[in-house]
Amino acid sequence: MFEFLQYRVADAMTPIPITTGPDTRLRDLERLFETHDFNGIPIVDEEQHLLGMVTKFDLLKAFTLNPSVMVPPYEAIMEQTAESVMTHNPVSIAPELPLSRLVEKMVEMRTKSFPVVHEDRIVGIIAREDVLKALRRATSHQPPPRDPQP
């Protein structure tokens, strides 16, 4: 386990994640979730600045009903944009954060994944699965991979 203490987020994250823009339709987000089995999809502008995150839970929120709203057809809901359901200004993680601190944050916030941001641009995403792989690597006494700085 000592080896794990040497790992940084950059050692375990998925670099250059699939992202999408705020005008992406929910039907297209659903397709991305289905195709890639992501926990969340970063929403970015043209310069890769993080604007928000959409999770599967956020997608489900589009289907919550209340007494003041008539039930819209499924197709109408799926035409809404990512911006309508995304979490604005999500918590992001720096690539240099120790993985041990990330684990604390994941447990504390009960979050499945975090966008990784460097110099105001998204450079990766890190999910629970990535952390578990890093733990497995560390317990087999493999040093963390050292990629070039983002």
Image (cartoon, rainbow, N blue to C red):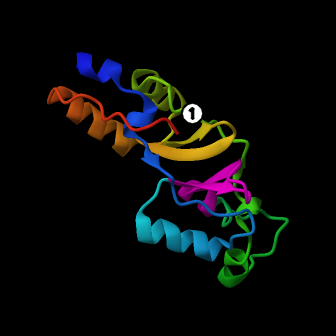
Q: Residue furthest left?
A: 140
Q: Is residue 74 shown above or below 29?
A: below
Give residue 44's quadrant in the image: bottom right
Q: Nearer the viewer, residue 99 or 11?
A: 11
Residue 108 in percent (x, y) is at 51, 26
- Expressed as whole percent of the image width and height from the top left, the position of residue 31 reads 52, 74
Task: Please give the count of numbered marks on the rendered protein.
Answer: 1
Look at 54% across and 58% down and name the residue there.
56
Q: Residue furthest right?
A: 68
Against 92, is 105 above or below? above
Which region is colored magenta?
40-60
Q: Residue at x 19, y 30 (%)?
A: 142
In percent of width and height, residue 51 lies at 73, 50
Residue extending farthest front: 148
Q: Residue at x 68, y 73 (%)?
A: 25
Q: Residue at x 66, y 44 (%)?
A: 121
Give above or below for 71 relative to 14. below
Name the foreground residue: 149 vs 136. 149
Image quadrant in which the N terminus is located: top left
Quarter of the image for residue 20 reads bottom right
Measured along the vertical axis of the image, is residue 76 above or below residue 7?
A: below
Name the side, left or right, on which 128 lies relative to 121: left
56 in magenta: yes
The percent position of residue 89, horizontal first and vertical second, equals: 73, 42
Q: In the rendered view, does 37 fall on the left or right side of 3?
A: right
Q: Residues within 10 Å of mark 1 (few under 14, many from 20)?
A: many
- Say left or right for 4 vs 62: left
Type of the residue with mark 1? Ile
Residue under numbered circle 1: 93
What kind of element bears circle 1?
loop
